[in-house]
Amino acid sequence: SYPEETEFLRSGLYKWAGDAYSFDKDGAYIEVVTSPNNPDGAIREAVVNRDGGKLIHDLAYYWPQYTPITGKADNDIMLFTFSKATGHAGSRIGWAIVKDIEVATKMVKFMELSSIGVSKESQLRAAKILEVISDDCQNSAPDKEENFFEYGQRLMSDRWEKLREVVKRNGVFSLPKYPQDYCNFIGKYTDPSPAFAWLKSKDGLNCDNLLRELKIVTRGGTNFGVDSNYTRISMLSLDEEFNLLLERLSAIKGTIINGNN
């Protein structure tokens, strides 16, 4: 949604310039580094690396349940969201960690002007939930099996294993492969388990349309600047919905063969 939001504001100070890999203009710029990336789950770093630029690191998915935590987050401007950290999307709370006090002050002013501040009720609720999770992670009782993030990592890992098995059997799609890495938070090697599955159809089919025919609602690749043979599937649904997703994905191979006949 970055292009849409940038253009909607119609600011005289900046405009959307597209993919950082193809950026070749001189002068000041702002580069947004989303890591892990949405939608493909890849770990990203700054690309442009020129003088006169500012970096914004969107770390919404940099949590142990989605990716191995390989190092401390220590960037100039870092964005986080409550919805991806704990799943409490309804509270509508995000936060930033900013090194430059002048930049932070401008961000606070923008929030005041654009939303008349942030709901105190939501802030209190978010603070309480984070407190509970923090206490849970610091509780190392002998009989304790796993904390909040370890539970999330196990759940996401299990879902990805099931999805990969279904995709392997139907032979119609492919999924990205991610390198295993050591997670400093969990204390062992873990596989990335992104919040979204970046699905690609092997035969150049319109992936989004194909899945919608089977009542699987996704977000097509054209929304992310790539071909329609890609689509994004959420991995964060309720258990009942996720199991239904697997069931409907399992039926796709037979549907395509019957259609060709």
Image (spheres, grey):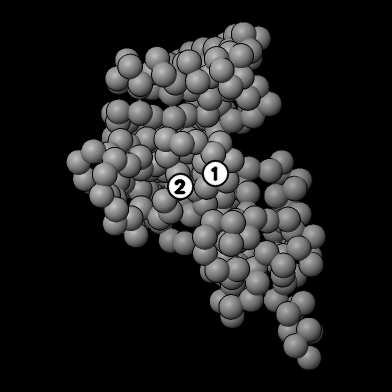
SS at badge 2: loop
Q: Looking at the image, can residue 136 be seen?
A: no
Residue closest to the eye, 229 or 102: 102
| Residue 190, x across and y down, in percent | 40, 45
Q: Residue at x 61, y 14 (%)?
A: 116
Give the Cα distance between marks 1 and 2.
7 Å
| Residue 44, x across and y down, in percent | 35, 48
- Indicate whether 67 appears above or below 176: above
- Indicate whether 251 appears above or below 42: below
Residue closest to the eye, 70 or 38: 38
Mark 1 packing: few (<14 Cα in 10 Å), some, or many (20+)?
few
Write down the quadrant of residue 168 in the picture. Answer: bottom right
The residue positioned farthest toward the front in the image shown: 12
Q: Which residue is mark 1?
A: 7
- Indicate whether 234 appears above or below 28: below
Marks 1 and 2, the one that precedes in the sequence? 1
Q: Residue at x 70, y 49 (%)?
A: 242
Q: Is residue 237 left or right of residue 113?
A: right
Q: Looking at the image, can residue 23 be seen?
A: yes
Asked if the residues shown at circle 1 and circle 2 are in contact, with their CB atoms under 8 angstroms apart, the answer is yes
Residue type marked 1? Glu
Residue type marked 2? Trp
The residue positioned farthest toward the bottom in the image shown: 261
| Residue 62, x across and y down, in percent | 43, 36
- Please state, as top left, top right, bottom left or bottom right, where the N terminus lies in the image: top right
Q: Which mark is residue 16?
A: 2
- Please state, as top left, top right, bottom left or bottom right, where the C terminus lies in the image: bottom right
SS at badge 1: helix
